[in-house]
Image (spheres, helix red, strand yellow):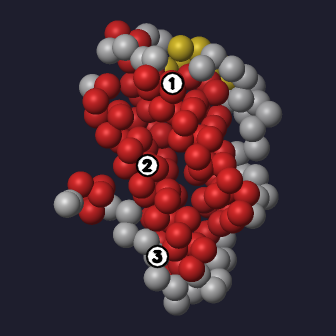
Amino acid sequence: MLDRFHLLFDYERWANDRVLASLQAAKEHGQAVRLFAHILAGQEAWIMRLEGQDSKGVALWPPQSLAECAGRLGALDQRIRAYLKGLTEADLSREIVYRNQTGNEFRNTPLDILTHLGLHSQHHRGQIALQLRQLGQEPAVTDFIAFRRP
């Protein structure tokens, strides 16, 4: 299972890099940069929770520029990879307790949270693609199968 999560986050980085490039090439963005900033903020909040930190200070819809998003990608990727590197198969099923941005307490396993991270990002990358298409721009292809093709 850990190998699949390493693959998932290799894909995440690849897809996020492609979205960044398509946004940098676009003449108009609409709400696409806001969505991209949300993807990154969500990843930051969840990795903090996985690390046992309080994520309350992370704005989930930060007003960030495309340049600020670009600057966050590398550090966030390194943080996620460091977390995965220290994870064992047994850790995946251990329940963790965390609080969301409003202070509500929840319990989930890293297995559930890491799965959510990939699905959450993909959902919003689809919204970004739609936003760019509606503005007459060409969105990046971020399908997992495209990532796996030689």
Q: Is residue 38 above or below residue 132?
A: above
Query: Disc 3 to disc 1, how far (Cα)?
Result: 30 Å
Q: Tag 1: Cα neighbours inside 10 Å, few (<14), some, or many (≥20)?
A: some
Q: Is residue 35 left or right of residue 90?
A: right
Q: Earlier in the sequence, mark 1 or mark 2?
A: 2
Across and down, in percent, residue 93 comes to 38, 14
- Front position in the image: 37 or 61: 37
The residue that disc 2 covers is 12
Query: Disc 2 to disc 3, how far (Cα)?
Result: 16 Å
Q: Please, what is the three-letter code of the amino acid marked with disc 1? A: Tyr
Query: Disc 1 to disc 2, how far (Cα)?
Result: 15 Å
Q: Which numbered circle lies on residue 30?
A: none
The residue that disc 1 covers is 83
Q: Earlier in the sequence, mark 2 or mark 3?
A: 2
Across and down, in percent, residue 16 comes to 49, 57
Quadrant containing the N terminus is top left
